[in-house]
Every structure is written in C-alpha cells, then in structure tokens.
Image (spheres, coloured by chain):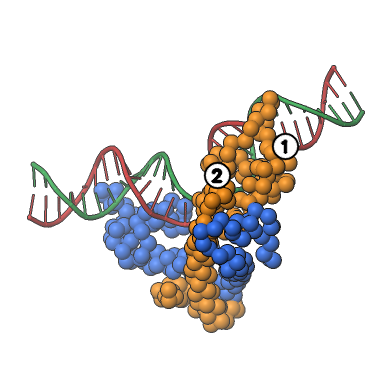
Chain colours: A blue, B orange, C green, D red
Amino acid sequence: MNIGTVAKRSGVPAKTIRYYESIGLIASAGRSANGYRVYTSEEVETLRFVSHARSLGFAVKDVANLLTLWRDRSRASADVKALARGHIAEIDAKIAELRNIRETLVDLVQRCHGDDRPDCPILDSLATSSTEHRT
Amino acid sequence: MNIGTVAKRSGVPAKTIRYYESIGLIASAGRSANGYRVYTSEEVETLRFVSHARSLGFAVKDVANLLTLWRDRSRASADVKALARGHIAEIDAKIAELRNIRETLVDLVQRCHGDDRPDCPILDSLATSSTEHRT
DNA sequence: CTTGACCTTCCCGGCACTGGAAGCCCCATA
DNA sequence: TATGGGGCTTCCAGTGCCGGGAAGGTCAAG
C-alpha cells in the first residue's frame, strides 16, 4: 500500500502521515525499490487510532502515550482512564474560559446599539475596564 | 517611558510589545539617544486596549480592526458589533465542539473500570469506532 | 511517447508568542 | 574607579500541528 491509499483509508492526509513519522509518533514505514513508503493494513489501523484520538482533542504527546498503552497487552486500564480524566479536566477548563468570555461579549454586544452612531460600549470597555472575567 | 515601564503599566510583556511593533499591530515607538524605545502614556492606553481585546479571545488581526475602529471617531458602532458577534459565533462553535468531545470522553471514562486489568473501552473505542460525535 | 497522477525531499508560512544569546547602556555601591 | 546588576538592543530558534508549494523521480494508461 502506498501513502495515498493509506491516507484515504485512515483519514490522515499523506502530509500528516509523513509528519507523524518525522516526529516519531509512528514508526518509519518500509520502502519499496523506488523509494516509496510501503504500508500494511496494521499501520492503517494505527493511523485510524491516532486520528480518532486527535479528533477527541488529545495532544500528539498524549496520543503517543495512548499508543504505547494500546500496544501494551499488560497495561492497566487505570492508566488510560487517568489520561482521559486529565484531558476532560483540560476541556472543562477551556469551556469555562470560553463561557466567561462569551458572557462578557454577549453583555457588551447587548449594550451596543449597533447603528450609524460612533458611540460604542464595546470599544469603551476595551479601552477602560480590565475586562475582568472571573477565573 | 522605557519599554519595561510600559510592560508593567499595560500588562503586555516587553517581548510582546516588540513583537506587536514588528508585525505592525502598533506603530513603531520613538527612540531616545541611546536607542531605547520611548513611549507616551497614550501608547500605554493602546496596549491596554490590545491586551483586553486579546484576553477576550480576539485574534490579532481582529484587534487590528478594533484598533482602527477605536481610533476612528466617525465609525459606526454597527461595525464593532458585527465583529463582536462574529467572534461570539466562533466561540459558540468551539464550545459546542468541546462539549461534544467532553460528552464522548465522559461516556468512555464511565465505561472503563480503571483498575489493574488491561481491558479498556477507551482504547477499544479509539481503535475501532469512528468516534463520531455529531456536529 | 506523452500525459497525468502519484511519490519523494525540502523549505516556508501561519498563529502568537517565548526563550536565549551576544552585546550596549546606565546607575549605585564598595 | 572598578564592578555588579539591571535594563535595553538585535537576531535566531522553537513551540504545536500541520498545509502549500517547488523541484524532481516513477509508473500505468492511451
């Protein structure tokens, strides 16, 4: 299998596959006589795994850990769970942050009449207040 | 005023001030005889504005637009409002995405017993399913 | 034989900074 | 007066995660 086929089957663009190889997230692919990378269906599975993990927002480093755990038949599921829990915590923090920002913005937008006049509470607020959204 | 003082008063690190100057977000500062950047309190205000806008998650390009609008005495507040509304929409999209991810993860974590045994629905799911969270 | 689709490597750009190195400048203190 | 410690300058490089595109080799079909 060449890289293009793998890209289609795994959902990971060829460029990204080469990138993952370059940073050591996946092993170096074998090469055929002409220098092309050659893949087995096992590697497609690995890339699918990576793709899924990435789409759940795991950082590439976390994906590396997940891959290790995945391949380790004697792993403890507790380790995986801890990793996932940590990730949920990060996501919660991000959501909270975004919600705060959103609230502030909605408030400002509501107070801005939004017509031809230059008077604008949004700009006023940016200029003066400390945009304190409680953390 | 030297850059260090401005950094303290505006909350923007000196490195970042120089960076903002280099990308043209703020105007080039004046220089004193020894080559140091010299600032007025007006520039501190500008940097405060920038800092607030950034902390509300506006991209640097958006901040550039906001700065222009801020300085334009004849601006229409509708323009500002539109920019802010667009930003809220982006934030909403991000929150929705994160919530979907979170839901999936919470579900997986709940189904993982998380002990010494290797059996783990989280890894299983990453390996097989398409981690479809509805968009 | 040519075309076009594939593959290779390499380097750049983008986001928004941040760290660090090398080298001035200025002031206070021993 | 020497010295030490900040602060300032520039420039380069790295972060995370790729995507674009150039220059060139390869392969199957028409």
SS category of the residue bearing label 1: loop
| A12 sits left or right of A60 in the view | left
When asked about the image quadrant of residue A117, the answer is: bottom right
Give me the residue at 67% from left, 31% from top. B36
Could you say which is closer to the camera, residue D25 or residue B36? B36
According to the image, label 2 marks what residue? B25
Give me the residue at 39% from left, 56% from top. A16
Give me the residue at 35% from left, 65% from top. A10
Q: Is residue B35 above or below residue B111?
A: above
Residue B58 coordinates in the image, percent (x, y)? 55, 57
Could you say which is closer to the camera, residue A59 or residue B10? B10
The alpha-carbon separation of the residues under discs 1 and 2 comes to 20 Å
Question: Which quarter of the figure is the C terminus of chain B placed in?
Answer: bottom left
Q: Is residue A22 visible?
A: yes
Q: Is residue B63 visible?
A: no
Q: Mark 2 or mark 1, which is nearer the start of the sequence?
A: 1
Q: Is residue B60 above or below residue D10?
A: below
Q: Chain of mark 2?
A: B
| B67 sits left or right of D3 in the view | left
Contact between marks 1 and 2 (CB within 8 A): the answer is no
Disc 2 marks which amino acid?
A: Leu
When asked about the image quadrant of residue D30, the answer is: bottom left
Q: Residues within 10 Å of mark 2 (few under 14, many from 20)?
A: some
According to the image, label 1 marks what residue? B1
